[in-house]
Amino acid sequence: MDDNELKLILIKKGMKELDIDRLIRAARQKKTSISWQFFWSLSGLYWYSFFIIIAYFFFTHRMSEKELMLFNVIYFSLLFMLFFLTPFFKKFLWSVHILLALRGR
């Protein structure tokens, strides 16, 4: 697949042409695939999600039932605010959608 076809696919998915050019240029300079370069450009989103999940299990592994219920109410209400009331969740889903569209290119 050449660059023009790839640009058209990514523009249809919502990326800006300038971002696409930077992504292709960075992938060529580092001699990696475009999907891998895209993953690393937004890796903070994925690491953030991973550490939120790990933090939950770190804090809850020795709690009693009453403490766990209270912690869940507080934790999930904060998680709801972080994910759904900020653009984080929308960008996270968009980035996964782009990664699926690239599929190793």
Image (cartoon, rainbow, N blue to C red):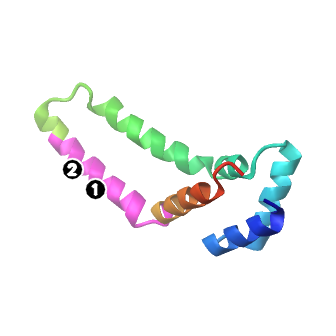
Q: Residue 77 carries which label?
A: 1
Q: Residues within 10 Å of mark 2 (few under 14, many from 20)?
A: few
Q: In which quarter of the image is residue 54?
A: top left
The stretch of residues the image draws in magenta is 69-88
Foreground residue, 97 or 41?
A: 97
Q: In this view, does 53 lie to the left or right of 76?
A: right
Residue 80 picture location, percent across and down = 33, 58
- For the residue labelled by badge 2, is the local secondary structure a helix, a strand or a loop? helix
Quadrant of the frame with the N terminus: bottom right
Residue 25 picture location, percent across and down = 85, 56
Residue at the (84%, 43%) spot, across then down: 30
* Number of numbered tags placed on the structure image: 2
In the rendered image, the residue lying farthest to the left is 66
The chief SS type of the magenta part is helix
**Depicted 57 relative to depicted 82: above or below:** above
Q: Does the magenta stretch include residue 47?
A: no
Residue at the (42%, 42%) spot, across then down: 52
Q: Badge 2 is on which residue?
A: 73
Q: Quadrant of residue 21?
A: bottom right
Q: Do we see residue 19 in this rendering?
A: no
Residue at the (20%, 29%) spot, across then down: 63
Foreground residue, 51 or 5?
A: 5
Q: Do we see residue 45 in this rendering?
A: yes
In the rendered image, the residue lying farthest to the top is 62
Residue 3 picture location, percent across and down = 82, 63
Amino acid type, mark 2: Val
- For the residue labelled by badge 1, is the local secondary structure a helix, a strand or a loop? helix
Contact, CB < 8 Å: mark 2 with mark 1?
yes
Amino acid type, mark 1: Ser
